[in-house]
Image: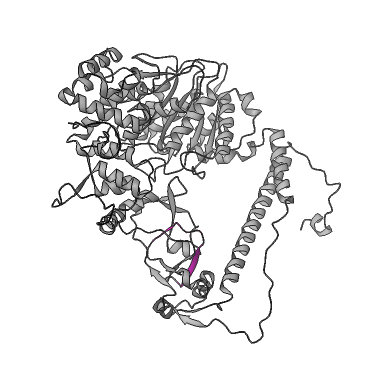
């Protein structure tokens, strides 16, 4: 299995890498560069004082390289985009070199789970003593004993490797999470199913922290934890003086054992039992290691999970929006969801943006927050709130802090009594009667849109909101920094040239668009995605940024994948000549759209906005881009024109923001005054007579 790894240290004797190898795709993934970049490194640095490492077998079809040599070369050359190359390489090489990556994964995680329970380095412990340690820490063989004993003669080498990986990752818990970062290499379905991205996991932890009082002993359970993604993320996110107790159901499946290893590596207290426990519940449906479930099965699983929820405890469920939010076509599924709403247990529904499931960038997920039935609440008085975050894409691993704060206050109000909800000013959530929602027989989000008049339940909140809008309107507009316009008597124009001529002189470069697979393109913003610009976006038939694609997935699946650069002109010839300037860059252009790129040396003569304007002014039957005639700018005016156009763009953006504020203020005043929660005084307002008459 895992080879004997030699002495500790860095460079050629690094125990985390010694004896392990990497392929060129491995190196590219670890360095976070394209595969072609690694090929370039091999050619450019084939000779010299610090050449690229030689392959283990130069004749092999898929050459492999000593991981320790590659790591040393990357660090000394300062190549790539991953400062943790060595630590990540230890994980990748271990899973790649072993004949059974899943078995190697189990062995390493088992040893890492034992590491917190000994003060001695794993590599220094006698194999028999390691087995005794596993027996002492895991006497009932629930997470690590059998994996440790099963290593047999490989145990000393595996222990040295596990210790070195833990050292490279700073601690055993981080080492296990780093191993899970390379989970796709194992080919193990219990690890690679519907993996959720960090923003969802962090949001669930924040919701639980908000709903669980700080002065209580916090116990968290997941009836189907899979390999423990959700439990680990939630417990790691919570900041408690008292330890948080994790409850994992009884069972001997591989995924359950891994979940317990992750908790043990963090030294979190863990209990195991087969009955109900007095705990808050977090769960993903279907679980990570399960196949897809139809909406009826998803809802039945949720209903069963919360059936015995203790009084005062909350349940937070993450599942597909197709079951938790959307209109249901299956009468059986519809009945289960209706019953959950009628019971009063379902309190909050949060629709999340697409792109939060690693393997399914187009799927939308939702979060349900459930509680125990409130005493004395009849069906007509029971309520729930529905919040729509589908347009609030996270930034990196987090949703916007202000969005999370306001959402949490909405959810806290929804967990209380009807009086609590009536006194709260909801920002995202719409307060609904459960009976009305059930009667509508439609998506929960669609039902929520019918209750806009209930937003202003808190007069103070409404007043504060309107004051903020008015203050924004009175902010001074940024002064324009426009240049002085002067006449040029006898000035020479920049001249007109065809696109063919500009390309021939190197003033413009052409780039083709990409032929994208429809399944890779998603609607709406999401973490890690970039805009897709096609013909519809160029001609204005679709909004810029409405379609997006996962950036890393695009670069990995499209070998010649390229992103736009700031100032690129994206153009089409059909249904008419049209062009738009990509001011910010970092977009993916979809064929039939193509790109004109102005190199730096030509920017003084070719201004992208001028070129785009001339293309848009072409006649509708001018379908040959080579023959398009465009203007150049006088050499001494190009920079000044580009700067001025930037200022004008900022002014246009400020005016659009101001118009949106006016629209929001108008709607807020209509709702606030009509609802009787705010009043107006116009003593100091001068209103034109024609406006008073209703113009």
**In the displayed image of the protein, which residue is found farthest to the left?**
59
User: Residue 16 placed where, x, y %?
Assistant: 27, 34
Residue 330 drawn in magenta: no
State the residue at coordinates (47%, 49%): 524
Please tell me which residue lies in front, 87 or 297: 87
Residue 587 drawn in magenta: yes
State the residue at coordinates (31%, 46%): 29
Question: Which corner quadrant holds the C terminus?
Answer: bottom right
**Residue 423 position by quadrant:** top right
State the residue at coordinates (42%, 61%): 534
Relative to 258, is 609 on the left or the right? right
Please tell me which residue lies in front, 81 or 228: 81
State whether residue 211 appears in this view. yes
**Residue 308 position by quadrant:** top left
Colouring scheme applied when the structure was drawn: one colour
State whether residue 287 appears in this view. no
**Residue 260 position by quadrant:** top left
User: Residue 276 placed where, x, y %?
Assistant: 39, 14
The residue stretch that appears in magenta: 576-590
User: Residue 144 placed where, x, y %?
Assistant: 27, 20
User: Residue 340 placed where, x, y %?
Assistant: 46, 26
Relative to 339, is 415 on the left or the right? right
Above or below, 194 relative to 391: above
Please tell me which residue lies in front, 342 or 684: 684
- Give the mark count: 0
Question: Which corner quadrant holds the N terminus?
Answer: top left
Relative to 8, is 277 on the left or the right? right
**In the displayed image of the protein, which residue is found farthest to the front?**
49
**In the displayed image of the protein, which residue is found farthest to the right?**
683
């Amino acid at each position: 299995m895992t080879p004997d790894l030699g002495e500790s240290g860095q460079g050629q004797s690094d125990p985390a890498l010694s004896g392990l190898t990497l392929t060129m795709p491995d190196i590219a993934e670890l360095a976070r560069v394209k595969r072609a970049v690694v090929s370039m490194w091999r050619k450019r640095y084939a000779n010299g004082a610090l050449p690229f490492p030689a392959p283990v077998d130069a004749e092999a079809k898929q050459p492999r390289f000593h991981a320790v040599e590659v790591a040393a070369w990357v660090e000394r050359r300062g190549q790539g985009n991953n400062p943790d190359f060595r630590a990540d390489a230890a994980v990748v090489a271990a899973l790649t070199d072993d004949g059974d990556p899943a078995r190697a994964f189990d062995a390493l995680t088992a040893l890492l789970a034992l590491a917190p329970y000994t003060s001695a380095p794993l590599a220094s412990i006698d194999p028999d003593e390691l087995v005794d340690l596993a027996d002492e820490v895991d006497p009932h063989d629930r997470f690590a004993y059998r994996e440790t004993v099963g290593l047999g003669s490989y145990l000393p080498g595996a222990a040295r490797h596990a210790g070195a990986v833990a050292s490279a990752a700073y601690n055993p818990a981080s080492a296990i999470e780093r191993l899970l970062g390379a989970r796709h290499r194992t080919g193990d379905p219990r690890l690679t199913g519907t993996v959720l991205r960090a923003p969802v996991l962090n949001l669930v932890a924040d919701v639980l922290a908000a709903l669980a009082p700080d002065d209580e002993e916090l116990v968290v359970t997941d009836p189907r934890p899979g390999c423990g993604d959700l439990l680990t993320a939630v417990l790691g996110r919570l900041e408690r003086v008292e330890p948080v107790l994790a409850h994992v159901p009884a069972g001997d499946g591989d995924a359950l054992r891994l979940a317990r290893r992750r908790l043990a590596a963090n030294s979190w207290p863990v209990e195991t039992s087969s009955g109900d426990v007095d705990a808050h519940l977090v769960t993903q449906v279907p679980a990570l290691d399960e196949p897809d479930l139809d909406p009826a099965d998803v809802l039945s699983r949720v209903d069963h999970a919360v059936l015995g929820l203790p009084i005062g405890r909350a349940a937070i469920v993450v599942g597909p929006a197709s079951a938790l939010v959307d209109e249901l076509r299956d009468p059986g599924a519809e009945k289960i969801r209706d019953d959950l709403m009628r019971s009063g247990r379902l309190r909050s529904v949060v629709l999340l943006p697409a792109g939060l499931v690693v393997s399914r960038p187009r799927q939308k997920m939702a979060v349900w927050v459930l509680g125990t039935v409130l005493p004395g609440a009849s069906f007509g008085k029971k309520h729930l709130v529905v919040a729509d975050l589908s347009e609030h894409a996270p930034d990196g691993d987090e949703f916007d802090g202000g969005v999370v704060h306001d959402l949490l206050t909405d959810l806290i109000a929804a967990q209380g009594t009807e009086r609590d909800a009536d006194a709260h000013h909801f920002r995202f959530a719409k307060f609904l009667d459960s009976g009305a929602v059930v009667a509508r027989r439609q998506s929960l989000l669609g039902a929520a849109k019918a209750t806009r008049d209930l937003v202003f339940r808190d007069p103070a909140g409404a007043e504060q909101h309107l004051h903020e809008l008015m203050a924004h309107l009175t902010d001074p507009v940024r002064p324009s920094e426009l240049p002085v316009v002067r006449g040029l008597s006898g000035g020479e124009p920049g001249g007109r040239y065809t696109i063919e001529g500009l390309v021939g002189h190197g003033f413009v470069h052409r780039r083709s668009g990409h032929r994208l697979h429809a399944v890779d393109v998603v609607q709406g913003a999401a973490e890690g995605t970039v805009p897709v610009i096609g013909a519809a976006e160029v001609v204005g038939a679709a909004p810029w940024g409405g379609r997006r694609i996962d950036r890393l997935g695009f670069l990995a699946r499209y070998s010649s994948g390229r992103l736009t650069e700031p100032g690129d002109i994206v153009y089409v010839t059909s249904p008419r000549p049209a062009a738009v300037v990509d001011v910010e860059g970092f977009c993916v252009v979809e064929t039939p759209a193509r790109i004109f790129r102005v190199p730096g040396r030509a920017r003084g003569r070719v201004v992208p906005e001028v070129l785009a304007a001339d293309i848009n002014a072409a006649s509708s039957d001018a379908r040959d881009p080579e023959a398009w005639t465009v203007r150049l700018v006088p050499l001494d005016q190009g920079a000044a024109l580009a700067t001025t156009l930037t200022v004008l763009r900022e002014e246009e953006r400020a005016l659009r923001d101001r118009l949106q504020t006016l629209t929001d203020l108008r709607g807020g005043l209509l709702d606030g005054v009509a609802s009787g929660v705010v009043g107006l005084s116009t003593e100091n307002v001068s209103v034109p007579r024609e406006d008073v008459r209703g113009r």
